[in-house]
Image: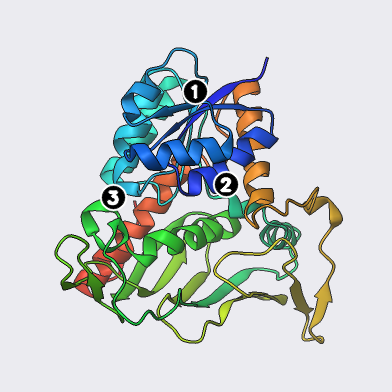
Amino acid sequence: MARRIGVIGAGFGTMVHVPGFRSEGWDVVALFSRDPERVRKAAKEAGVPDVHTDAMEMINRDDLDAIAIATPPGQHHELAIAALKSGKHVVCEKPFAVNAMQAREMQKTAEGSGLTAMVAHEFRHTPQRAFIKELLTDGYVGDFKLCAMELFFNRGVPATPPAMTWAHRKSEGGGFLGALGSHYIDGLRYWFGDVATASGSLMTVRPDVTDPKSGKVVQSETDDTFSFTLAFKNGGTATMTASSALVPSRGARIAVMGTKGTLYAEQGGPNPAEDGATMGSQDGGPLKALDTPGRLTPFKDGRDPRLMAFRLLVRDFNRGIEEGGSPAPSFSDGLRCQEVLDAIRESAATGKTVSVG
């Protein structure tokens, strides 16, 4: 009999979580949104039988094995802890929490529950990032010294300022650093281990947003541009400069340098693609294309470019439930990433380099 899951969030939840879990053997039986009309429409289109406008009502059902949380981050703390305390396994979207204090409580609850709890940093499973991890493990670059990353894109330039949403409010965990910086920080930890210190800066290049209630132009509370420098406990440094306000978009570029070699990776948009290529050079030799092993692309899913990686994460989630434990990225990884985010924000406010954790 298939395991049963409820999905909290009718946006990204229906685009990726519902088809992803369903394709990996789950029976998606319930969908939540606070908007009754929206959740009914989304559930009908996705073929989900039950709808809820009360998240706790869904969480407390006794016929669900797991909860997927695909809401804005301001709700993650309450929902994840409630789901774990109700005996449900949990997959929680990123950014994990609003701050490290919340993240620590979520991690402790998960650890004490004996349940499987993972963070949806699915990009660890994209072929390009998994291949770079293997090359680093095999010593392709020698001793790691520096990773330099840039990400520049935009979501369009409307004639009038866009509507203010949770993404523009600090209290709800908004901001570009959390929205996409968290994915890149998790990727850096995946490649290089835990972070020792962080410094950074935050900017809002396009602060104007429209208050949906008054129709007036107001100012966003959160960043759309950031930079940071991280020093790792195992040695080496990473830098990143990113903006969601650059026109035209340029995508992302990544360089990893060590004592023996260099790796380069590029992507056309904010997220790594299924067919992302990797270039490499060793011992001062010419830069050449490196063939990504076919096993790192076990299948393709044309419904959404994020689905293959997400489905691989769900497979790990299934394994965690069957064998016991929480495969990476676990709630412990979510906490470590949140500590780095907090340190960057503290550095931006104080101008100082901040110890992590």
- The part of the image, by quadrant, that contains residue 19 is top right
Q: Earlier in the sequence, mark 1 or mark 3?
A: 3
Q: What percent of the width, then of the height, locates residue 125?
A: 66, 51
Q: Residue at x 17, y 60 (%)?
A: 213
* Label at residue 267: none
Judging by the rendered image, the residue that carries numbered circle 3 is 99
Q: What percent of the width, then of the height, locates residue 187?
A: 55, 58
- Tell me the kind of residue under disc 1: Leu
Residue nearest the viewer, comparing 207 with 186: 207
Q: Residue at x 81, y 63 (%)?
A: 292
Q: Disc 1 to disc 2, how far (Cα)?
A: 23 Å
- Tell me the kind of residue under disc 3: Asn
Q: Earlier in the sequence, mark 3 or mark 2?
A: 2
Judging by the rendered image, the residue that carries numbered circle 2 is 16
The scheme the figure's colours follow is rainbow
- The part of the image, by quadrant, that contains residue 51 is top left
Say above or below: 328 vs 59. Answer: below
Judging by the rendered image, the residue that carries numbered circle 1 is 115
Q: Secondary structure at mark 2?
A: helix
Q: What percent of the width, then of the height, locates residue 73?
A: 34, 48
Q: What percent of the width, then of the height, locates residue 262?
A: 70, 77
Q: Disc 3 to disc 2, how far (Cα)?
A: 25 Å
- Tell me the kind of residue under disc 2: Val
Horizontal side, residue 197 vs residue 187: left or right: left
